[in-house]
Image (spheres, rainbow, N blue to C red):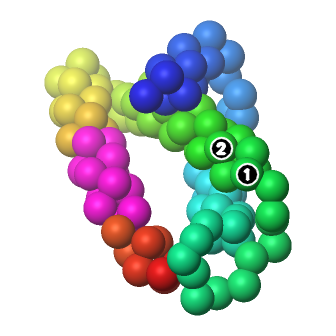
Amino acid sequence: NRGDLVGRFLGRWKDIPGRGLLSWYTTGRVLIVVLLLMCRVEPRRIPYWFNHDSIPTLLIIVLAITGGQVLTLSLRYAPEVVEGKRAKTTVGTIMAFWGAIGRVLGSVSTYLVVLIIE
C-alpha cells in the first residue's frame, strides 16, 4: 500500500514515462511478474534464478510503485483525449471503474501465480 501511494504521488508530480511510453511502461510490468516467478520461494516445482531473499521484496516494491504511477497517469491522461466537460467526466468515471476492476483482477491473479509456483 505504501508503494502504491508513493507511485500515485510520483504520477501527480512527474509525467514519467510520458503519454507515448505509458503503454510500454504498463506492458513492462509483466516482466516484473515473470521475474517474481523466478525468485526462490519454497515449496516450488519450477527452477529459480534468484537465490537472495531481498530480490522478491525489491520486485514487489517496484511493482507497487509502478502500479500506483500507471493508474494515476492513466486517470490523468484519459480525459484529455476527449472534448467537452460531460465527456471528460464520463471518461474519468469509466477509467476509475476499470482501474478498480484491474486492481481486483490483479489481486485474484495472485492465486494463479501461487498455483504455478507450487
Q: Tell me the residue that label 1 is attached to.
A: 53
Q: Residues within 10 Å of mark 2 (few under 14, many from 20)?
A: few
Q: Secondary structure at mark 1?
A: loop
> Residue 65 or 110: which is nearer the viewer?
110
Q: Identify the residue at image location x=29%, y=61%.
A: 108
Q: Secondary structure at mark 2?
A: helix
Residue depicted at 67% across the width and 16% down the height: 14
- Whether pointer 2 and pointer 1 mark residues with C-beta atoms closer than 8 Å, the reply is yes
Can you say which quadrant of the picture contains the N terminus? top left
Residue 66 in sight: no
Establish if 65 lies above or below 103.
above
Looking at the picture, does residue 26 appear above or below residue 99?
below
| Residue that numbered label 2 is attached to | 57
Report whether 12 appears left or right of 55: left
Q: Magenta segment, which residues?
A: 98-110
Q: Amino acid at mark 1?
A: Asp
Q: Is residue 71 left or right of residue 108?
A: right
Provide residue 68's location: percent of width, then percent of height: 50, 32
Q: Position of residue 39 (x, y in %)?
A: 70, 65
Q: Residue at x 67, y 52 (%)?
A: 56
Most common secondary structure along the magenta stretch: helix
The residue nearer to you, when weighing 45 against 64, is 45
Q: Nearer the viewer, mark 2 or mark 1?
A: 1
Q: Is 101 one of the magenta-colored residues?
A: yes
Residue 4 image point, x, y percent: 49, 29
